[in-house]
Image (tube, rainbow, N blue to C red):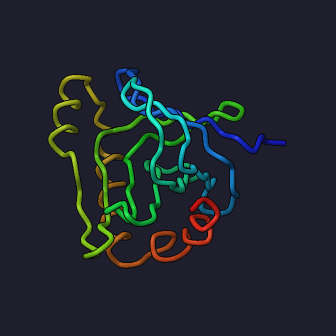
Protein backbone atom coordinates (compact mmCIF):
# COMPACT_ATOMS: atom_id res chain seq x y z
CA UNK A 1 0.00 0.00 0.00
CA UNK A 2 1.60 3.31 -1.03
CA UNK A 3 2.13 6.02 1.54
CA UNK A 4 0.00 9.17 1.61
CA UNK A 5 3.21 11.22 1.41
CA UNK A 6 5.43 11.19 -1.66
CA UNK A 7 8.86 12.78 -1.90
CA UNK A 8 9.26 14.57 -5.25
CA UNK A 9 12.88 14.89 -6.37
CA UNK A 10 13.91 16.78 -9.49
CA UNK A 11 17.56 16.80 -10.54
CA UNK A 12 19.30 18.25 -13.55
CA UNK A 13 20.90 15.95 -16.12
CA UNK A 14 24.33 16.31 -14.47
CA UNK A 15 22.84 15.09 -11.17
CA UNK A 16 22.74 18.46 -9.44
CA UNK A 17 19.81 19.25 -7.17
CA UNK A 18 16.92 21.16 -8.68
CA UNK A 19 13.77 20.71 -6.52
CA UNK A 20 12.85 18.45 -3.62
CA UNK A 21 9.61 18.53 -1.64
CA UNK A 22 7.02 16.33 0.06
CA UNK A 23 3.55 16.07 -1.46
CA UNK A 24 0.34 14.34 -0.50
CA UNK A 25 -0.82 11.55 -2.82
CA UNK A 26 -4.32 12.63 -3.90
CA UNK A 27 -5.19 10.00 -6.49
CA UNK A 28 -3.96 7.84 -9.31
CA UNK A 29 -5.86 7.52 -12.57
CA UNK A 30 -5.24 6.82 -16.24
CA UNK A 31 -3.40 10.17 -16.51
CA UNK A 32 -0.92 9.49 -13.72
CA UNK A 33 -0.41 10.23 -10.05
CA UNK A 34 -1.91 13.45 -8.67
CA UNK A 35 0.03 15.05 -5.80
CA UNK A 36 -0.94 18.01 -3.65
CA UNK A 37 1.39 20.55 -2.07
CA UNK A 38 -0.10 22.86 0.55
CA UNK A 39 0.92 26.37 1.57
CA UNK A 40 3.69 26.22 4.16
CA UNK A 41 5.29 23.04 2.81
CA UNK A 42 9.04 23.07 3.37
CA UNK A 43 10.97 22.43 0.19
CA UNK A 44 14.37 22.82 -1.40
CA UNK A 45 14.97 24.80 -4.62
CA UNK A 46 18.40 24.77 -6.23
CA UNK A 47 19.89 23.49 -2.98
CA UNK A 48 18.33 26.22 -0.81
CA UNK A 49 15.60 25.74 1.80
CA UNK A 50 12.27 27.29 0.86
CA UNK A 51 8.66 27.36 2.03
CA UNK A 52 5.78 27.15 -0.45
CA UNK A 53 3.70 30.33 -0.32
CA UNK A 54 1.08 29.18 -2.83
CA UNK A 55 -0.35 25.63 -2.91
CA UNK A 56 -0.30 23.60 -6.11
CA UNK A 57 -1.06 20.19 -7.60
CA UNK A 58 1.42 18.10 -9.56
CA UNK A 59 0.53 15.47 -12.13
CA UNK A 60 3.23 12.84 -12.61
CA UNK A 61 2.08 11.07 -15.79
CA UNK A 62 2.60 7.41 -16.51
CA UNK A 63 5.54 7.09 -18.91
CA UNK A 64 5.65 10.61 -20.33
CA UNK A 65 8.44 13.15 -20.84
CA UNK A 66 6.86 15.86 -18.67
CA UNK A 67 5.29 16.67 -15.32
CA UNK A 68 2.57 19.26 -14.80
CA UNK A 69 2.01 21.80 -12.04
CA UNK A 70 -1.45 23.34 -11.68
CA UNK A 71 -1.70 26.59 -9.76
CA UNK A 72 -4.37 28.76 -8.15
CA UNK A 73 -4.34 32.57 -8.19
CA UNK A 74 -2.40 34.70 -7.52
CA UNK A 75 0.25 32.67 -9.36
CA UNK A 76 0.41 34.05 -12.91
CA UNK A 77 0.94 30.61 -14.47
CA UNK A 78 -2.24 28.54 -14.39
CA UNK A 79 -0.38 25.49 -15.74
CA UNK A 80 3.38 25.01 -15.68
CA UNK A 81 4.81 21.88 -17.31
CA UNK A 82 8.42 20.82 -16.90
CA UNK A 83 9.91 18.73 -19.67
CA UNK A 84 11.49 15.82 -17.82
CA UNK A 85 12.60 12.27 -18.32
CA UNK A 86 9.83 9.79 -17.52
CA UNK A 87 9.29 9.46 -13.77
CA UNK A 88 11.11 6.72 -11.90
CA UNK A 89 9.42 5.56 -8.72
CA UNK A 90 11.41 4.07 -5.87
CA UNK A 91 9.00 3.31 -3.07
CA UNK A 92 7.32 6.57 -2.10
CA UNK A 93 9.86 8.77 -3.89
CA UNK A 94 9.46 9.90 -7.48
CA UNK A 95 12.61 10.93 -9.36
CA UNK A 96 12.53 13.19 -12.42
CA UNK A 97 15.35 14.71 -14.48
CA UNK A 98 14.46 18.28 -15.41
CA UNK A 99 15.41 18.93 -19.04
CA UNK A 100 15.16 22.72 -18.85
CA UNK A 101 12.30 23.32 -21.29
CA UNK A 102 9.00 24.46 -19.79
CA UNK A 103 5.58 24.95 -21.34
CA UNK A 104 3.43 27.47 -19.48
CA UNK A 105 -0.12 28.77 -19.84
CA UNK A 106 -0.69 32.24 -18.40
CA UNK A 107 -3.77 32.68 -16.26
CA UNK A 108 -5.12 36.05 -17.44
CA UNK A 109 -4.45 35.77 -21.17
CA UNK A 110 -4.40 32.02 -21.81
CA UNK A 111 -1.15 32.57 -23.71
CA UNK A 112 0.98 29.45 -24.01
CA UNK A 113 4.76 29.92 -23.86
CA UNK A 114 7.74 27.67 -24.50
CA UNK A 115 10.40 28.75 -22.03
CA UNK A 116 14.12 28.19 -21.40
CA UNK A 117 15.13 27.13 -24.90
CA UNK A 118 18.48 28.87 -24.31
CA UNK A 119 19.10 26.85 -21.12
CA UNK A 120 18.17 23.66 -23.00
CA UNK A 121 20.66 24.45 -25.78
CA UNK A 122 23.38 25.34 -23.26
CA UNK A 123 22.86 22.17 -21.19
CA UNK A 124 22.55 20.05 -24.32
CA UNK A 125 26.08 21.07 -25.27
CA UNK A 126 27.53 21.16 -21.74
CA UNK A 127 26.05 17.89 -20.48
CA UNK A 128 26.02 16.06 -23.81
CA UNK A 129 22.33 15.29 -24.06
CA UNK A 130 21.95 12.22 -26.29
CA UNK A 131 20.05 12.70 -29.55
CA UNK A 132 17.14 10.48 -28.44
CA UNK A 133 16.74 12.51 -25.23
CA UNK A 134 16.68 15.74 -27.26
CA UNK A 135 14.10 14.29 -29.67
CA UNK A 136 11.85 13.12 -26.82
CA UNK A 137 12.14 16.44 -24.97
CA UNK A 138 11.33 18.48 -28.08
CA UNK A 139 8.40 16.19 -28.98
CA UNK A 140 6.98 16.54 -25.45
CA UNK A 141 7.29 20.33 -25.60
CA UNK A 142 5.49 20.40 -28.96
CA UNK A 143 2.70 18.12 -27.69
CA UNK A 144 2.22 20.20 -24.52
CA UNK A 145 2.28 23.49 -26.42
CA UNK A 146 -0.65 22.24 -28.50
CA UNK A 147 -2.51 20.63 -25.57
CA UNK A 148 -2.29 23.68 -23.31
CA UNK A 149 -3.56 25.84 -26.15
CA UNK A 150 -6.48 23.73 -27.31
CA UNK A 151 -7.94 22.66 -23.98
CA UNK A 152 -6.93 19.01 -24.09
CA UNK A 153 -7.38 17.34 -20.72
CA UNK A 154 -6.01 17.33 -18.12
CA UNK A 155 -5.17 20.95 -18.97
CA UNK A 156 -8.71 22.30 -19.32
CA UNK A 157 -10.67 21.46 -16.16
CA UNK A 158 -9.72 17.95 -14.94
CA UNK A 159 -7.08 19.30 -12.54
CA UNK A 160 -9.49 21.64 -10.73
CA UNK A 161 -11.02 18.97 -8.47
CA UNK A 162 -7.53 18.07 -7.21
CA UNK A 163 -6.46 21.69 -6.81
CA UNK A 164 -9.57 22.35 -4.69
CA UNK A 165 -8.22 19.83 -2.15
CA UNK A 166 -5.07 21.85 -1.42
CA UNK A 167 -6.23 25.47 -1.73
**Which residue corresponds to the image point at 47% horizontal and 50% vertical from the top-left?**
67
- Which percent across, then down, holds residue 105? 32, 66
Nearer to me, 37 or 34: 37
Q: Residue at (28%, 36%) from the top-left corner?
A: 131
Please say if 166 is above or below 63. below
Report which quarter residue 143 is drawn in: bottom left
Asked if residue 121 shows in the view, the reply is: yes
Residue 141 falls in image quadrant = bottom left
Image quarter of the C terminus: bottom right
Q: Is residue 142 left or right of 88 when viewed as pictured?
A: left
In the drawing, does residue 64 fall left or right of residue 136? right
Residue 143 in sight in this render: no
Q: Residue at the spot x=17%, y=37% of the render?
A: 121
* Snapshot quadrant of residue 118: top left
Q: How many marks?
A: 0
Location of residue 132 in the rendering, given as x and y in whole percent from the top left corner:
34, 39
Which percent across, then down, holds residue 32? 61, 56
Q: Work out which quarter of the rendered image holds the N terminus and state it.
A: top right
Residue nearest the observer in this picture, 4 or 83: 4
The answer to which of 164 and 7 lies nearer the viewer is 164
**Drawn side of residue 82 relative to residue 2, left or right:** left
Q: Residue at x 47, y 38 (%)?
A: 51
Left or right relative to 86: residue 124: left
Residue 115 vertical placement versus 85 (above, below): below
Q: What percent of the width, then of the height, locates residue 138?
A: 29, 50
Amino acid sequence: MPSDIVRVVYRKYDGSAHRDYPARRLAEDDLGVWLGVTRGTESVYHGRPSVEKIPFVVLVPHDAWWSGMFNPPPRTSEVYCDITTPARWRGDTVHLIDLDLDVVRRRTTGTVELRDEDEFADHRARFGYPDDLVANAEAAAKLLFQALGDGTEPFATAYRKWLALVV
